[in-house]
Amino acid sequence: METRELEKISKQVRKQIIEQVYKAQSGHPGGSLSIADILTVLYFNQMNIDANNPNSSLRDRLVLSKGHCSPALYAVLAQKGYFKNEELNTFRKIEGKLQGHPDMTKVPGVDMTTGSLGQGLSVANGMALSSKLNHDGFRVYCILGDGEIEEGQIWEAAMTSHKYKLDNLCVIVDNNNLQIDGKIEEVKGLDNIEGKFKSFGFNTIVVNGHKIEELIDAFNTAKMTKGMPTAIIAKTVKGKGVSFMENQAQWHGKAPNEEEYKIAIKELDK
């Protein structure tokens, strides 16, 4: 699929993120918008998946460790055909399947139930190791938040990734520099994310997380890397695509009102 087509899909995903959170009057738009391009490239350019056979044992897996950004995942899954777009209207509704955090027992295409931050890489390790031991050949992608990697279990898991030479594992850090309490460097002094993963034995790649071509090149490089896991540090903008949400920590977990919703959709329609 050409870059322009991927960009169109990503824009539609962003609109659906805003629509889900607005209709539910609940959710996390900021971090969902920052990973829209990443998920679009994975599901429409990189991953070996089939919406008609969502439980194939040989499919590539995605673990959205930052599970609160489920609106982005749901939008991509709907675009890919795992369920109808209309189902996005049930986001965070009591009768709906699309909970605030993804549930693998209810939503086709969701490979892991997530939401408790810090645990996703451990699960992704298990999947990747299983693929190797059983010679299944599938790849595993794990999206982490930069605030999330302040948690110690992430680094214990990173040691495991290196120990077992999980070259079929690709970690993507959504490095938008903001978390619920503010800037990551102010909350816990987090810096040099690339160097940290490199010191834990990862092949590290830094990209602009909103440049489709850079993302494709990085994922292709990860596939060719042997003997070690890869960590892609994706430099992103929280709230990307909606001017008044961009780089604003308050939009980590806040729903737009009607006026803000209309402005956001108008901007994304341009």
Image (cartoon, rainbow, N blue to C red):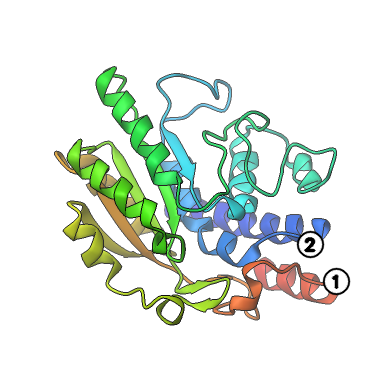
**Callout count:** 2
Q: Residue at x 15, y 39 (%)?
A: 226
x%, y% of residue 63? 47, 42
> Separation of disc 2 and disc 1 at Cα?
8 Å
Q: Amino acid at mark 2?
A: Tyr
Viewer-side residue, 192 vs 159: 159
Q: Which residue is mark 2?
A: 22
Quadrant (top left, top right, bottom left, bottom right) of the C terminus = bottom right
Q: Amino acid at mark 1?
A: Glu
x%, y% of residue 32? 58, 59
Q: Residues within 10 Å of mark 1 (few under 14, many from 20)?
A: few
x%, y% of residue 133? 26, 21
| Label 1 secondary element | helix
Q: Residue at x 55, y 70 (%)?
A: 240
Q: Residue at x 65, y 81 (%)?
A: 244
In terms of image quadrants, where is residue 139? top left
Residue 89 tag number = none
Residue 218 lies, with reference to residue 187, above or below; the image says above
Q: Residues within 10 Å of mark 2 (few under 14, many from 20)?
A: many
| Label 2 secondary element | helix
Determine whether, in the image, residue 77 is placed left or right of residue 118: right
In terms of image quadrants, where is residue 134? top left
Give the farthest residue toward the left. 227
| N-term-proximal mark, 2 vs 1 | 2
Query: Answer yes or no: do the residues labelled 2 and 1 have beta carbons within 8 Å?
Result: yes
Q: Which residue is mark 1?
A: 258
Q: Residue at x 34, y 28 (%)?
A: 138
Viewer-side residue, 129 vs 50: 129
Determine whether, in the image, residue 42 is placed left or right of residue 226: right
Quadrant (top left, top right, bottom left, bottom right) of the N terminus = top left
x%, y% of residue 60? 41, 31
